[in-house]
Amino acid sequence: MDWLRFESPGYWITFSVGFLLVAVWESWRPNRETMVPAGRRWTMHGLLLSTVMVVNTVLFPLSAVAAAISAQGNPWGVLSFASIPFPIRAVAGVLLLDFTKYATHWLYHHVAFLWPIHRVHHSDPDFDVSTGARFHPLEPVLVQAVDLGLILLLAPPPAAVLFAKLAGVASNFFEHANASTPAWAERILRAGIVTPDLHRIHHSQGIVEQNRNFGEIFTCWDRLFGTYKGQTAGGDKALVIGVSGYQDPRSLEMGEMLTQPFHKDRGSE
């Protein structure tokens, strides 16, 4: 099957439907009141996302699915070997791609010159579906480079790559929802996937919480490497979102978001 022709429409359908569903959910059952109205937040974060997409397209004209297709048959691509049953190759491909997201996310928090870039995402004083679009244009460079390198090296099935990509888009909006799932659903979901309540802990102003819950889709990596945190001492409602020194509306200005990585950390002032 020509998976490449499904990549673009699949992305935009998942993006649009995922965003709208989460937006309706958090409007109907908000977890907390935001400092800045949704309309302004969505507009500014949408403009930032558009910039990210332009940069990504220029730097990486080869898409993830196109890379997977071109890598099929490579002698070093162990996940393309027909001797391995397709379900195993597909599951391994999805898990490996999700692990790379966990690993690169961890690096952005622990490598000194990478944190100021990722801080743009964390410096949002609010937490809602549009936070999932708040990334500095430089941030996806490392993520995309690692993803494409892994795909070209291991040659996972294109179907698995497409599924991982679409699941990542849906998960990104879901986990940034300004909403909470019912307690019974939360217990079930967090056993396998990242929920808004779990990811909100990662967006805490507290450094300990910021260095927990790095997973994008699955919680298994955090559990395996000891970075999982299911609850904070004061509970969800006591959680202060953002980064110290960035608790004012100017953090939402386009110029501020683009230049923030090159400024002195306000938290150290």
Image (cartoon, rainbow, N blue to C red):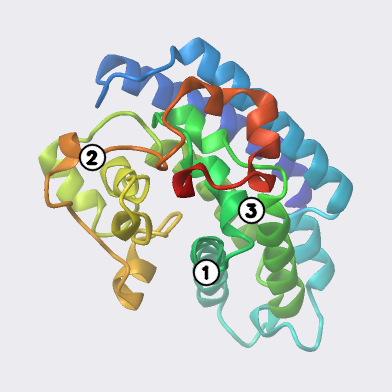
In this rendering, the label closer to the viewer, 3 or 1: 1
Q: Quadrant of residue 244?
A: top left
Residue type at mark 2? Leu
Left or right: residue 58 compared with residue 12 = right
Left or right: residue 190 compared with residue 219 = left
Q: Quadrant of residue 78?
A: bottom right
In this rendering, the label closer to the viewer, 2 or 3: 2
Q: Residue at horizontal 43%, vertical 16%? A: 36
Q: Residue at horizontal 29%, vertical 70%? A: 223
Q: Residue at horizontal 77%, vertical 50%? A: 4
Q: Is residue 52 above or below residue 201?
A: above
Q: Is residue 18 visible?
A: no
Identify residue for label 1: 103
Residue type at mark 3? Leu
Q: Are marks 2 and 1 in contact (CB under 8 Å)?
A: no
Identify residue for label 2: 239
* Mark number displayed over residue 162: 3
Q: Residue 254: where, in percent of width, then height?
A: 67, 25
Answer with mark 2 or mark 1, whichever residue precedes in sequence.
1
Q: Quadrant of the N terminus?
A: bottom right
